């Protein structure tokens, strides 16, 4: 004959208490991990974008030092008979990335590498201009194109600065979402409490 016996369980080791304690511990660990990883990364990214926005706001045609560039001249291609094709008026500006990237915000680097002016063999930007008969004007046009490259890289990569109105709207949405979550949590808790009361034996 099978003999049923009851196992004595101390009051301090109530199963629901243990499960609840483990659940709280798990959530606490997960929240700690989240705090230790995500926010610093977001803060760093936001800081990088802010620095890039400031750098781009100060960007001019003279920002990139001429002494890090190699400037050469050659004859322009095209139909002959014009003075522009008889003198070395075409300007070519070569900007080695090893000199350019250190003065450009890091968030722009990847976009710069994808520009059509990037020459992989020399690891540099090669920009040409021959629209003018004067060498100096063609050089200026090359640096204007370089400025456009940097501005486009910033526009494609750097996030826009959040306005006070946008920040306020985001704050309201987060607050409403948090309140809705708390209400749902309270409702769920009340339902669980009601079920526990209904399942208790009546003496």
Image (tube, rainbow, N blue to C red):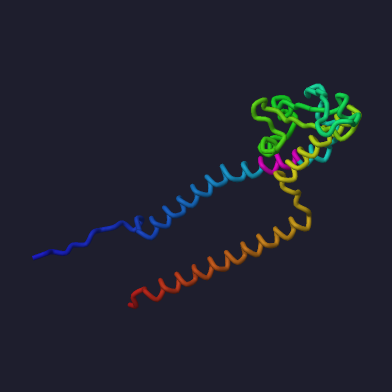
Looking at the image, residue 185 lies above or below residue 123: below
Determine which quarter of the picture holds residue 14.
bottom left
* Residue 151 colored in magenta in the image: no
Residue 29 is situated, as x and y percent measured from the top left of the image, at 49, 47
Q: Give the quarter of the figure containing the C terminus.
A: bottom left
Quadrant in the picture for residue 72: top right
The N terminus sits in image quarter: bottom left
The answer to if 49 sits in the magenta stretch is: yes
Q: Which of 27 and 109 is in front in this view?
A: 109
Looking at the image, residue 169 lies above or below residue 127: below
* Left or right side of 75 for 190: left
- Seen from this angle, which residue lies furthest left? 1
In the depicted structure, whether residue 70 falls above or below residue 30: above
- Position above or below: 155 against 104: below
Q: How many labels does the image show?
A: 0
Residue at 91%, 29% (x, y): give it.
83
12 relative position to 75: left or right: left
Could you say which is closer to the camera, residue 24 or residue 118? 118
What segment carries the magenta color? 44-52
Q: Which of 200 and 64 is in front in this view?
A: 64
The picture places residue 115, in percent across and down from the top left corner, at: 70, 38
Residue drawn where x is 89% and y is 33% of the image: 132
Residue at the (81%, 29%) spot, across then down = 64
Residue 101, x across and y down, in percent: 71, 30
Q: Position of residue 107 (x, y in %)?
A: 69, 38
Magenta residues, dominant SS class = helix
């Amino acid at each position: 004959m099978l003999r049923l016996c009851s196992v004595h369980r101390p009051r301090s080791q109530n199963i629901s208490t243990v499960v609840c304690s483990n659940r709280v511990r798990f959530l606490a660990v997960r929240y700690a991990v989240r705090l230790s990883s995500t926010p610093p990364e977001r803060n760093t990214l936001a800081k990088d974008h802010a620095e890039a926005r400031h750098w781009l706001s100060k960007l001019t045609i003279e920002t990139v030092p001429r002494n890090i560039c190699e400037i050469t001249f050659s004859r322009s291609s095209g139909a002959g008979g014009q003075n522009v094709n008889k003198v070395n008026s075409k300007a070519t500006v070569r900007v080695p990335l090893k000199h350019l990237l250190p003065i450009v915000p890091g968030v722009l680097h990847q976009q710069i590498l994808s520009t059509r002016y990037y020459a992989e063999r020399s690891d540099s930007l090669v920009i040409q201009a021959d629209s003018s008969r004067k060498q100096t004007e063609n050089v200026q046009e090359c640096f204007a194109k370089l400025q456009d490259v940097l501005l486009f890289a910033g526009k494609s990569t750097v996030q826009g600065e959040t306005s006070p109105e946008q920040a306020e709207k985001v704050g309201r949405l987060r607050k409403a979402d948090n309140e809705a979550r708390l209400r749902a949590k309270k409702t769920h808790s009340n339902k669980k409490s009601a079920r526990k009361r209904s399942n208790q034996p009546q003496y």
